[in-house]
Every structure is written in C-alpha cells, then in structure tokens.
Image: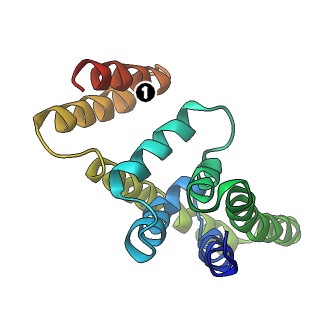
Amino acid sequence: MTPAIFWQLVLGFGAISLVSVGGGIAVLPEMHRLVVEVHGWMDSADFARRFALAQAAPGPNVLVVGLFGWHVGGILGMLTAVLAMTLPTSFMAFGFSRLRARLAGRMWLRIVERGLVPIAVGLIAASGIILAQGTGTGWLPLAVTAASTVFVWRTDYSPLWVLGAGAIVGLAFL
C-alpha cells in the first residue's frame, strides 16, 4: 500500500467518523461517495456486496470499512480504515458521555438529543437508497430489494433471512 492511499484512508474515514450520528451505517452514503465516486476503488455493485458480507458477519456494522480497506490496501489497508473510522468517534463518544453526565436534566440537552433522531433516521434511509442503487438493473434485483425491504420492515425475523434468501436467488439466476 502506497503512503498516498494510506493517508487517503486515514483522512477519508477519519473525517466520516466525526459525522457518524446514528452509527456507521448512517454514513454509508458518504463512504460510498469516498470509495466509489471520489477514489474509484470499486463500483457500486462491489460496494453493496461488501456491505452484505459485513452484515452477515458477527460484530458491529461499522466494521464494513475493514472490507473496503482490505480491498484497497490488503491487511494494512483494513487496519488503517478500521482505526481511522473508530478511533476519532470513540474519543468523541467518551468525551460526550462525560459532558452529558454533567449536563443531565438540562432542557436544551434533551431538545438537542431529540433533534438528532430524525437526522440519524434520514441518514440511515439514505444508506438504504445507496445500497439499493448498487443492486443492479432489471426486474429481479428491484423485486428482491422491494421484498427484502418489506420483510425487514414488517416482520420481527432476523435480517439474516433476507441475506440467505438473496444469496439463493442470486445463485439460482446467475
């Protein structure tokens, strides 16, 4: 991995981590912009496949950046991307938790916290749109995406059922 790619990963994912209100998935559109549109390290379909693989694995959702980093720079790229995405936001969360403990009960703090909820929901919805765009064209990907969305939204079953069904459909129609 060249030093330039190392710094692109550090600066890109480090900056994204600082605005990850709602978690790593909330900033998936920005990750897509960085990885696909700005640097061209992969296309939208590869991005969506890596995201699906990360969702099937146990652990935090944000670890998908490790797969992006691995694609770009091998093991060092993976470690760089994960650390750049998790360290800044971890320090911010620690500092905010200490500040919040001191300010607990203040009306303005509750207003700010409630105001962040729709922002997080909107960011997560944007992530879904970006992933849906990476599924391809044609009636089958559109039908699978729509059915998956309804299934996850309207049932209490694990989203892993959607991943399994998608894999079976993908194998059947390859």
Quadrant of the rendered structure where residue 93 is? bottom right
Residue occupying the far left of the picture: 139
Q: Is residue 61 left or right of residue 109?
A: left
Image x and y of residue 83, in percent? 76, 63
Image x and y of residue 11, in percent? 65, 79
Q: Tell me the SS state at disc 1.
A: helix
Q: Is residue 26 left or right of residue 167?
A: right
- Does 6 appear above or below 138? below
The residue shown at (66%, 32%) is 58
Dividing the image into 4 quarters, which one contains the C terminus? top left
The residue shown at (49%, 45%) is 50
Dot 1: few (<14), some (14–19), or many (≥20) neighbours within 10 Å?
some
Dividing the image into 4 quarters, which one contains the N terminus? bottom right
Dot 1 amino acid type:
Leu
Number of numbered discs present?
Answer: 1
Residue occupying the far front of the picture: 2
Q: Nearer the viewer, residue 23 or 57?
A: 57
Q: Nearer the viewer, residue 112 or 136?
A: 136
For label 1, the residue is 163
Q: Is residue 158 left or right of residue 1?
A: left
Q: Is residue 166 left or right of residue 34?
A: left
The residue shown at (40%, 66%) is 36
The residue shown at (42%, 77%) is 38
Quadrant of the rendered structure where residue 95 is? bottom right
Q: Nearer the viewer, residue 38 or 127?
A: 38
Image x and y of residue 164, in percent? 42, 20
- Does 149 appear above or below 66? above
Image x and y of residue 19, in percent? 59, 72
